[in-house]
Each structure stands twice: as structure tokens, then as C-alpha cells.
Image: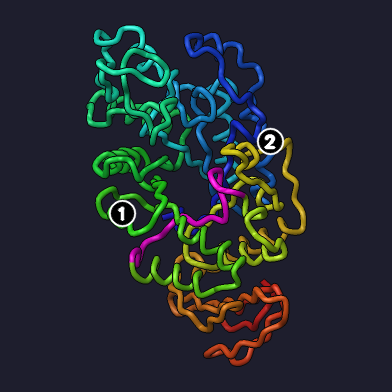
Amino acid sequence: MWFENTVFYQIYPLTLTGAPERNEDPENTALLHKQAGKHRVLEIRKFIPHLKKLGVGAVYLNPVFESDSHGYDTRDYRLTDSRLGTNEDLRTLCGELHDAGIRVVFDGVFNHVGRGFFAFRDLKKNREASPYKDWFKVNFAGDSHFGDGFWYEGWEGHYELVKLNLDNPSVQNYLLESIDLWFREFDIDGIRLDVAYLLPLWFIDKVKQRIRSLKPDAFLLGEVLGDNARRFYDQGHVDAITDYPLYKALWSSMNSLNFFELAHTIKRTYGEMYRGLQLFSFADNHDVERIASKLTDPEKLPLVYALLFTLPGIPCVYYGSEWGAEGKKERGSDASLRPAYKKPLPNALTARITALIALRNRTPELQQGTLKDLRLTNRAYAFLRELDGFSTAIAVNADDAPVTLDLPGFGAVEIPPLSAVYNRRGEGFLPL
């Protein structure tokens, strides 16, 4: 499938475009769309030449539909967020991305909705008489943190995020029909399931069957925070899950100068738990601190990306990180992780990442090949990627001094300090 050979790029449209943090009164949705004159989502078009030059083949968009604030508190799954523009604007963006040869994946937030969701507003107004009372898990004998006069289940204790009752066929039909609209109106190429670790596996399978009926090669990605989650493949039939163990190992092994952690993580993931499967890999994303802020030594940043694009996985770049954007969680706020940019800001790091993506794009063994360790020390790691009789060797040195590694089949290879080298199909070692 196309996604196994593709480098992704993640964009958070609401924050990239500088949209207001809060949406207006949900009772006036139609008026909001009529007055949405900013058409912010179209500003993302400025990034398309940058994405083409970078070499990415797909864009994963964080939530784009009408919501209360950050997008994961949905009001309406069928209307583009009025802070971003209209459905026509979003359709235009998706069309221009496709014209550039870039596929589009939407964020599917199906576990919970915002308090401004139309069905929840009706529940607050009509209580037991609401036709939507069974869309949620409600106790009319209790009360909520907001004084609604009834209790409801929220997402992990966050009661601004109202948990949907996915056992209700009406809820299932609403969500699946919304997916139909996404494919029909925006011609998307896949869905990323938010908090897939909380979704019933049978529901995930329903989503998979639906999207494959709409587009035979549609991609289904599940957000899973831990590991040992093969059931999402075997029962939910996702195409990939998020690789948080690799994310942690990438920065942690650099900071502690302990490549044994990284090698162990890869072996456990691809040699044991997920043999023959693909995971969605990343150095950072919208939920975690930027890799440039996570590293204790910023000079190791290029090494992280050298590993990201040569180790197994479906790699994804988070917007801005390709030029070294920083961002830390501050007092529980994610604002610094999700900045606004008027335009791309490419630099020397961007050029390095562009070269790495180009290497991966032209080297099938880096996309789907097996991995074999060649040499492993605390500060150096060399491995071989093999596919259909072709191989590429990678060697990374995280030390501030040169190191010479005796690599089986290649002999002694000297690697400069804080550097990575590669040997593609026996053509000799070159800087990575």
C-alpha cells in the first residue's frame, strides 16, 4: 500500500493559521459560517511548495471540523471549523494538495465530543425528553462539574470532552455517515483515530471496513500510547499504530548516550510484538515537547532524523520541527507546541531532512526492509536494512569524538563525531 512507502507531514490547522483559541456561540453555527471571512485554512496552501521540496507524500491534518476550542471537542463532524473557513475552502486545500501529489489524512475524533456538540446541547435543553439522551452515558440523578443537573462520562476526567456512547447504533451511523462525507466531499485518503486505545476494537473494524469500501487503499492509523497492542491490528485491522516507544527511545538514547535502549526498543517492536507490521514513527507531535527542546545537546538533532528516516516505520515530520522549532509543555499548556507560522522557515536542518527523505524515497529497503544489527555500543549504532537482495548499511556516532566500527561485510568504518554515514547497496560510505 502507498502509505508503507510514504513520509508524512503533520499540520495542526487551527494553530498553524493562528485561529482564535475559542470558537463563538455554538447556537449560531450557521451564522458563524456565513461570517467566517478569514478562510484561514487556505493559508496552508503556502506550504505546498515547501512540502513538495521536502519530499513528503502525505499530510495528516489535526482536527478541521467545527469545535469548541482545540478541535478535539467537536461540535459538528460535517462542517469545517468556522475559524478556518468553509467546506469549500477545505475542499480547495485538499484538491491542491492532491494536485501536488500529496495525499490527505483527517483526524477522526470519535471517542468524545465538545459540550457544544449539537446532540449534547439538545440533551441539556430537553433532558430525558431529548432524542439524543442515549448518545451519551448519562445519569439524570447526578450532576456534572458544570452544573448541568445530570452526570455524564467525560474523557479521562475532562468533562469538557463528552464521551459518546458508541454502543448506540444511531451514534455509529452518524459517525460512519460523516466519514462518507469526508471521502465524498474532500476526497481524503485516510483517517487517524484519536485515542484509538479507548475505542472498541469492533468499532475500529467498522471504520476500517467503511473507509476501504469508499477507497480501496485508504489508510487507517490508530493512536496508541503504549506497546504490546497487536490486537489493534488483529481485531481492529488498523494499518498502523503510533510508535511512542520509538519516540521515547530516540531522544532518551541520545540524552543518555545509550544506544542499547534504542536497539532494544526496535528489536522488541519489530522482532517480537509487531513482526511483519508497520508502525507510525515520529520525533515529536502536537502532544509532546518538540524534539529540539527535548534533547540536552541540540547538535544531536540531525542524528535523530537520520535514525527516524532509516529505521523501520512510517515516518512523520511535525510542522516546524524540520527547521528546529522549540516547544515545551508549560504549566499544563500545549500552546508552545503548536505555534502559528505565516510561511515555512527552512534552514540547514531542513536541507538535511530533505536529503534524508530523498534517500528514503529512492531506497525500498529503508521503507520496508528487515533490520539486522551490525555493531552496537553506548554511543554508536550500526545496522543493515535488507529487501529483495538489496541492502543499505547505516552507522550513527553520537559521541563528540570519532569512532571506528568493524562492520561485518564492510570492514573498518570511521565515523566522524556527531555524524551518521550510510552505504547504499555497496556503493561506499557517505555522510548521511
* Looking at the image, residue 127 lies above or below residue 225: above
Magenta stretch secondary structure, dominant: loop
* Looking at the image, residue 35 lies above or below residue 92: above
**Tag on residue 233?**
1
Task: Provide residue 247's location: percent of width, then percent of height.
Answer: 52, 58
Residue 337 seen in render: yes
Q: In the rendered structure, which segment of residues is drawn in magenta?
A: 273-289
User: What is the quadrant of the C terminus in the image?
Assistant: bottom right
**Mark 2 secondary-structure assignment:** loop
Residue 122 magenta-highlighted: no
Which amino acid, by three-letter code, is at mark 2? Ala
**Mark 1 secondary-structure assignment:** helix
Which amino acid, by three-letter code, is at mark 1? Tyr
Viewer-nearest residue: 73 or 159 = 159
Residue depicted at 66% across the width and 31% down the height: 17
Residue 102 seen in render: no
Q: Residues within 10 Å of mark 2 (few under 14, many from 20)?
A: some
